[in-house]
Amino acid sequence: MISSAAIWAALGAVGMALGTVPPLWGLANDPERRTHYLVLAGVTGVAAVAYTLMAFDIGTITASGRVVSIPRYVDWLITTPLILLFLAMLGRTGRGSLVRLVVADIALLLLGGVAVVISGPIRWAAFAAGVACFGLLAYELYVTIPRKATFSTERTRILFVTLRNLTIALWTLYPVAWLLAPSGIGLLSRDMAMLVVAYLDLISKAAFVALAVDGMDALADGDTGAVAVDPDESTPAAD
Ligand code: RET
């Protein structure tokens, strides 16, 4: 029998595939901002593949009595850095900032993955360390980047703030879902957890990508999205 987790995953795959259409359209029609569209197409495109695998229950392993979906974590490891790269491209805050974001991001995902598969109190320590990494990531997005950013236009700054707020608000819900799901205290069933996470993924990816594509004309002409080498620290504040 097809589990409802498989149905939610299949719906997630369709949603992500549809979410890839706007950046592909941009890629074909706006070659100036190719890099931006490629990054955005990667966000939903990779997730569409991961959800297809999950719908067929491919890559699911059981460890310490808990079910872990490898495609989900691989998807997150690829696409969350792409989301952060896009935000860093908007602010043009330099490589240092991007590296801090991506290191914190990968660390929190690995710690979360480890916390699912190990048992005993150490797993809660791994979870707490993951949450601490998330705190660092949020600090970078809320405080450091707005302070250092050199937005190409005022509309780019507004686009950054909108996407940044959407990202922080939604990403905060992931550790909550993790805690409630069978990975944590198990208040939610596996099917329910799949529904909740698929829903969170869809908004944090497909809605992010749709808003980003919609706001792309805010970027100044000639803004090709290269992540600059760290700009001068004395650049005036832009937050
Ligand atoms: C875990 C558990 C460990 C602590 C924290 C977590 C946060 C995960 C996040 C995931 C975001 C995923 C996204 C996917 C998009 O499709 C690993 C659940 C903090 C923030 C945005």
Image (tube, rainbow, N blue to C red):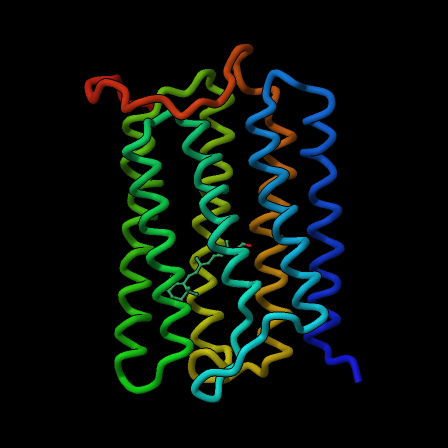
Q: Residue at x 63, y 31 (%)?
A: 213
Across and down, in percent, residue 74 comes to: 51, 58
- Answer with left or right where residue 82 lies relative to residue 51: left
Q: Nearer the viewer, residue 151 or 239?
A: 151
The C terminus - image quarter: top left
Please name the residue shown 61% across and 49% down the image. Answer: 46
Compared to 102, does 226 lie above or below? above
Image x and y of residue 76, in percent: 50, 56
Q: Nearer the viewer, residue 90 or 117?
A: 117
The number of discs equals 0
Name the image quarter holding residue 40: top right
**Is residue 12 positioned above or below 149 on the image?**
below
Q: Residue at x 32, y 48 (%)?
A: 103
Q: Position of residue 87 (x, y in %)?
A: 45, 35
**Residue 174 higher or lower than 231, as above or below:** below
State the residue lying farthest toward the top. 221
